[in-house]
Amino acid sequence: MKQEKTYRFPEAELKAFRKVCKERGIKVTPQRLEIYREVMKAHGHPSAEEIYSRVRERLPSISLDTVYRTLSAFESYGLIGRIQTVDRIRFDPNTKLHHHLLCKLCKGLTDFRWDDFDELAPPRDVSDWGHPETKHVQISGVCSKCAEEGRKQ
């Protein structure tokens, strides 16, 4: 049986997590720590169900509801990001300004930066609407790996 290497938080990441928990008056429980650990070590922006499946291997009594509520709390505290795709909600450990490429075939989600876009002011219609706080681009299509596999078939 393949044993998974335990993810060790970088000291700064763990310190930031503990600080936010302290500021919010919430305990750093084994469940919260494991859920946060799974998001931070994950590749590909996992869904709540994927995180639940991974955490449940170490904490068999954890519920999917606990995972959902914890992820929602982490998002509201600014610890993680939330990405809405067509078929599900996924979570992002990267809270810095960035955008996403979504493959319609393999559902792969890739981060990218777009400095020129980030520097643009929103159109006047948006300013008339109110006070926008963030802007995000999600580009969907077919990734090069899927396109290449499609050519081979």
Image (cartoon, rainbow, N blue to C red):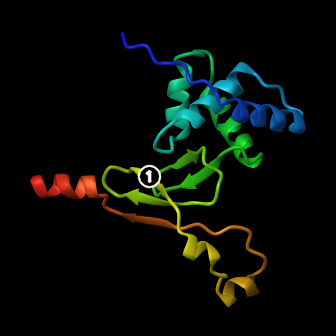
Q: Position of residue 102 (x, y in %)?
A: 41, 58
Camera-nearest residue between 14 and 138: 14
Q: Position of residue 139 (x, y in %)?
A: 44, 66
Q: How many labels were placed on the picture?
A: 1
Secondary element at image label 1: strand
Is 83 situated left or right of 3 in this image? right
Q: Is residue 128 above or below residue 2?
A: below
The residue type indicated by label 1 comes to Leu
Q: Residue furthest top?
A: 1
Q: Is residue 21 above or below residue 6?
A: below
Image point (32%, 49%), residue name? 106
Q: Position of residue 66 (x, y in %)?
A: 67, 30
Q: Residue furthest left?
A: 153
Check disc 1 and report the residue beneath it: 109
Assign the N terminus to one quadrant of the image.
Answer: top left
Q: Is residue 72 above or below residue 18?
A: below
Q: Residue furthest bottom?
A: 124
Is 152 situated left or right of 86 in this image? left
Q: Position of residue 38 (x, y in %)?
A: 57, 31
Badge 1, how many Cα within 10 Å: few under 14, some, many 20+?
many
Image point (59%, 36%), residue name? 40
Residue 91 image-quadrant placement? top right
Q: Is residue 133 above or below residue 61?
A: below
Image point (25%, 53%), residue name? 146
Camera-nearest residue between 64 and 43: 43
Image point (72%, 41%), residue name? 74
